[in-house]
Image (cartoon, rainbow, N blue to C red):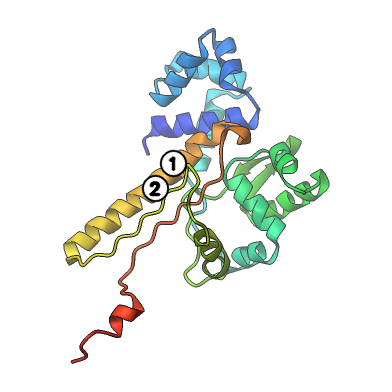
Amino acid sequence: MSQIKQITTLIKGLLKQQNITYAALADELQMSEANVKRMFSKQALSLQRLERICEILQLSMSELFLLLERNKVLVSTLTHEQEQQLVNDIKLLLVAVCVRDAWSFAEIVEQYSITEHQCLQLMARLDKLKMIELLPGNKYRLLIAQDFKWLANGPLERYVSHFVIKDFLAANFKEKQSYRFYMPGTYSATSIETLKRKLEELTREAAQLNQQDASLSVKERQRMGLLVAMRPWELEQFQQLRVHK
């Protein structure tokens, strides 16, 4: 990701944390809301405008760049202990998923049966697990990357395999936003590598879009499940018909 894109993404996250909407930012910058959105989508930030946005965020430009530098060292994998603690407590896992998706403290309490006291305790546990840095005013800084990967055969992978995927696929996928596609094939090694690379690109793009949309309120977003999978496989009934040599 380019540095300009990193700065744009960081600013949008900071605006979200301080509950500064695009409309409010537009008023401060004496711009239209449409132009503000265009400025972020095209990543067209002049130094003067960047300095003014920092003033609105009550940050110096040096503090912004320091935050940018710190954000480069996000954790891409969790330890076995971290994963185990998450799967052992469904509310802790829920809050971990919420903060990964940039939900505010107020949004978590509003949307789920979790009291403010419980939510603060759960976020403190995530802070202790080094997944977030808890800040004053029930705010936080995320310390895990958008595209972090669970441990092979670890607690999270087993939890996802036994519960999440089973529950996810046990639906008819008839909702307007749903999409299901399955196509078996017989491919060369080169084609398999091409498919794998494209799937990896898709997962990276999905993570970037999730981070990009973090500036929007929860009411403007919808939880979605995206399952990307590929492996050497043949239907068991087909295997039984193979000629064994």
Q: Nearer the viewer, residue 224 or 71?
A: 224
Disc 2 marks a residue whose amino acid type is Arg
Give the CA distance from mark 1 to mark 2.
Answer: 6 Å
Residue 61 % position (x, y): 53, 24
Q: Are marks 1 and 2 in contact (CB under 8 Å)?
A: yes
Give the residue at mark 1.
208
Label total for image: 2
Left or right position of 119 against 143: right
**Where is the N terminus found, in terms of image quarters?**
top left
Q: Secondary structure at mark 1?
A: helix
Residue 46 % position (x, y): 42, 16
What label does residue 110 carry, if any?
A: none
What label does residue 204 carry, if any?
A: 2
Q: Nearer the viewer, residue 43 or 236?
A: 236
Q: Sort mark 1 into few (<14), some (14-19) or many (20+) by Cα contacts within 10 Å.
A: some
Determine the image quadrant of residue 20.
Answer: top right
